[in-house]
């Protein structure tokens, strides 16, 4: 499992629903992640009604959660990106250094 940053904007319809029935959505969102085989670690809402989530997931579970949220009409503009620690980046750079010698830049 990797760490993923998930983002999405609440739709107008979802905001109307929350005005009519205010609630903390954390438990519902956590249950969705768990059903997809992922673990929600943090969930925030920005004043622009954009949701930010940090989860332990894989590509399949992240994509599944995003698909359900968009299909439900609750969120728009959903995206996920895998997060890397600086330790993981350092390891990647070691491998990239070896690859760099084998790459020919366009036009050279």
Image (tube, rainbow, N blue to C red):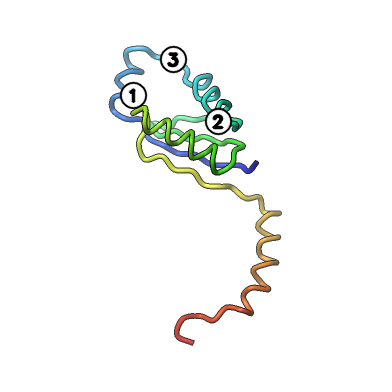
Viewer-side residue, 36 vs 96: 36
Mark closer to the chain start, 1 or 3? 1
Q: How would you rate the neighbour count of disc 1 (Cα within 10 Å): few for under 14, some for 14-19, many for 20 or more?
A: some
Label disc, if present, on residue 14 of the rendered structure: 1
Q: Does the image show residue 41?
A: no
Residue 44 numbered mark, or none: none
Depth check, front residue: 63 or 20 = 63
Q: CA distance from mark 1 to mark 3?
A: 12 Å
Decide which of tag 2 and tag 1 comes sooner along the chain: 1
Residue drawn at x 57%, y 78% is 103
Which of the 4 image quadrants contains residue 60?
top right
Q: Which residue is mark 2?
A: 36
Residue extending farthest top: 21
The residue labelled by disc 3 is 23
**Figure check: 18 above or below 78:** above
Helix, strand or loop under label 2: loop
Assess whether mark 3 and mark 1 are in contact (beta carbons under 8 angstroms). no
- Give the image location of residue 44, x and y in percent: 49, 30
Image quarter where the N terminus lies is top right
Q: Nearer the viewer, mark 3 or mark 2?
A: 2
Which type of secondary structure does the marked residue at label 3 adopt?
loop
Of 8 and 64, the residue lying toward us: 64
- Position in image of residue 21 (x %, y %): 36, 12
Mark nearest the camera among 2 and 1 is: 2
Q: Quadrant of residue 98?
A: bottom right
Q: Position of residue 42 (x, y in %)?
A: 57, 31
Tell me the residue at 43%/31% (across/down). Answer: 68
3 or 2: tag closer to the N-terminus: 3
Mark 2 vs mark 1, CA separation in Å? 22 Å
């Amino acid at each position: 499992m990797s760490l993923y940053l998930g983002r999405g904007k609440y739709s107008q319809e979802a905001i109307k629903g929350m005005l009519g029935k205010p609630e903390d959505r954390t438990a519902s969102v956590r249950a969705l992640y768990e059903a997809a085989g992922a673990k929600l670690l943090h969930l925030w809402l920005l004043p622009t009604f954009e949701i930010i989530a940090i989860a332990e997931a894989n590509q399949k579970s992240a994509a599944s959660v995003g698909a359900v949220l968009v299909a439900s009409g609750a969120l728009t503009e959903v995206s996920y990106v895998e997060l890397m620690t600086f330790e993981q980046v350092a390891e990647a750079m070691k491998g990239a250094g070896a690859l760099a010698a084998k790459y020919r830049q366009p036009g050279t």
